[in-house]
Image: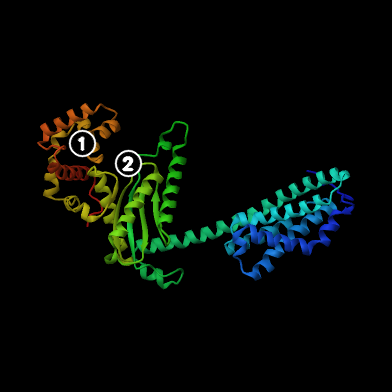
Amino acid sequence: MAAYKPEGITVGGEDLQHYLLSSLHRLQGEVVERLRVRLPVYGKLPAEQLTGDVTRMVRRGINGFAQVLTDGQMPGPEQLAELSGSAARRAEEGLPAEAVVAAYFLGARLCVDEVAARARGEDLAALTTLHRLILEYLQLVTTAVTAGYLQEMRSTAGERHSAQQLLLNALLEGRADSATASGAGPPLPPGYLVLSLSLSLAPHPDERAPDVDPAVAAQRKLRRVRTELDLHTRGAALTSLTTDGGIALLPCETDPDGLTPAHWDNTAQLTTHLERAAGSPVHAAAVPALPRDIPEACPVAAELTHIATASARPPGLYRLEDLAIEYQLSRPGPARDHMARLLDPLHGHHDLLLTLSTYLRHDADRRRTAQNLNVHPNTVLYRLRRITDLTGMDATRPADVPTLHAALTCRTLRQAPDTGHH
């Protein structure tokens, strides 16, 4: 847009830029006071910051617009760079972005209100020009301010992410002592909860929608899961996650022996929140560990998650004591082979194996199983009877359910390569 030469813009018989500059001291004081009253974050700032940096920011804004009224020229790169730098410092100090931008708009509004109150009937054209110029000015200023603020936030976030990644790598590699000795961050917590997550059992509905990019939907799911982990954790949650799952290290305020039932209840609630965030079932396994023991705890947690899914356990949180039998039977040897052979009669009957695992995963609920398989409940009942005829085990009988869980685990692990066992 071509620069407009606002020669002799007067309102109420007074030159506008002269009025603003002559009223600068009073106007900047009123703007700062309005910021303090209307935006609580400013009211909590130290007095020296209000009278110092904030007042300078307001004065710069009024001066900048007065200059526009002087020659019609909008701020150039140098002036906009100063505004960006100021916004970056506000970001570094932790002032919210909306509070920084609001200062410019509130100052502009106060100046316009002051001028409008002095207007006469013949000042309509001048007021129209004033509004056009101040809107263009605010557009440039807020763009520069937002860019400076976001650049600082990205830089800070990048540094924080790098520090967290270095700490995560050190813990996973058994270098917990070197991580604290470096002095690069806060001291390590007394312990961590190693949380292994499986998010791949069922994708979020968005990932299956024909008009939605599944990769984008999966990344959005992953971002929601990470956000939920951060909300749950007082310290930083260190994560190594993909859209299928992975490991999260949650800092604890006590060592592994000091965890209480309330802590485990809280972690179970976290799993429920993660399911809601993912929009799909989540199997999670938790292993408490001292920082130096994390390299040994991670494979155990990952294997427990695998066992929970392989044994057709319902989604939720699992600990070693919940899956101790299946975990022990998962070790290669004659016991695992024996348990796996219990389901050999179902070989070639994919529909029966799928029905069995779905039925157990849905807590022996025939209707939910039928709904998941898109068949009639009577079909589920017929297939369960066929399984009993072929294997001698009845999935509707509670006494047989643990054996079936163990058999499914051993069958799945026998078919997969033996990895991760110690």
Which image quadrant: the N terminus? top right
- Residue neighbourhood size for the residue with mark 2, other residues' Cα within 10 Å, grouped as few (<14), some (14–19), many (≥20): some
Tell me the SS state at disc 2: loop
Mark 1 is surrounded, within 10 Å at the Cα level, by few (under 14), some (14 to 19) or many (20 or more) other residues, namely many
> Which of the 4 image quadrants contains residue 182?
bottom left
Report how far apart the C-alphas of labels 1 and 2 lie in the structure. Answer: 16 Å
Q: Is residue 385 above or below residue 80?
A: above
Q: How is the image coloured?
A: rainbow
Name which residue type carries label 1: Leu
Task: Specify whether 202 is left or right of 304.
Answer: right
In the rendered image, the vertical position of residue 217 relative to residue 301, given as above or below: above
Q: Mark 2 is on which residue type? A: Leu
- Circles 1 and 2: CB atoms closer than 8 Å: no
Residue 146 screen position, x and y as percent: 63, 53
In the image shown, does 90 or 220 lie closer to the viewer?
A: 90
Give the vertical position of 196 relative to 278 (above or below): below
Residue under the point 46% across and 44% down: 220
32 or 279: which is nearer to us? Answer: 32
* SS class, disc 1: helix
Residue shown at the point (18%, 52%) measured from the top left: 331
Q: Nearer the viewer, residue 197 or 372?
A: 372
Where the C terminus falls, by quadrant?
bottom left
